[in-house]
Amino acid sequence: MSATASTATRPTDVSPLLRGAMVMSGGLLGLLSVFALVRAATGMAPVAPAAHEVAVAVHLMSVLPAVPLGLYILLTRKGGARHRLLGRIWMALMASTAISALFIRQLNHGGFSWIHIFVPVTLLSAWAAIAAARSGDIPRHRRRLVAMFLGAMVIPGLFAFAPGRVMAIWAFG
């Protein structure tokens, strides 16, 4: 059997439909983010006052590299030392993203908003995915991480482009 055929039939791989959804949604989030960052860096975007807050800066520095890294990890070969190292880095980025989000509250007059529900979702998903891997339940590990990528990164990431948020201001003015 060829390497391509064995790769396509591995039970730990995601379905082509789910793979496409991850590429499309992660790619869209990545492109929107790059667009917003380029506009901000070149002075084409309006100033977003919240962007100068430490928590927002830490949040952006954590989540922006986590988008392409997470997509790369989910779509490439699994199980080796590289996968484990990049997975640890991605988990650290996601934990930093979630924890820093707790300190971002300027849009809700100092209180938490509905989007903060993704903080415990992210942290609990990370814990569950790591526990599944350590117990050797790789199919559950994969399901948890795919759900975490889509449900704790892509969905809240797209909401970051809602009116009044830093990424929306930078991307759309």
Image: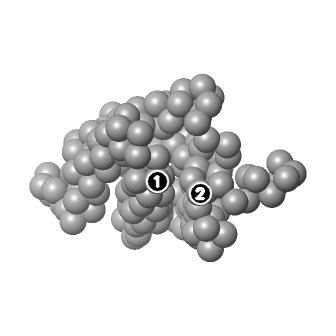
Is residue 63 rendered to the left or right of residue 55? right
Residue 2 seen from this side? yes
Secondary structure beneath label 1: helix
Compared to residue 108, the image places residue 136 above or below, namely above
Q: Quick one: label 1, few (<14), some, or many (20+) residues within 10 Å?
A: some
Amino acid, disc 1: Pro
Tell me what residue is drawn at x 52 percent, y 65 percent.
Answer: 173
Which residue position holds label 2?
A: 11
The chosen color scheme is one colour
Compare residues 173 and 135 and report the one nearer the observer: 135
Residue 117 position within the rendered picture, expressed as x and y whole percent measured from the top left: 22, 59
The circle on residue 139 is 1
Is residue 98 rendered to the left or right of residue 6? left
Tell me what residue is drawn at x 46 percent, y 46 percent.
Answer: 138
Classify residue 111 by image quadrant. bottom left
Is residue 23 rendered to the left or right of residue 132? right
Amino acid, disc 2: Pro
Compared to residue 27, the image places residue 70 above or below, namely above
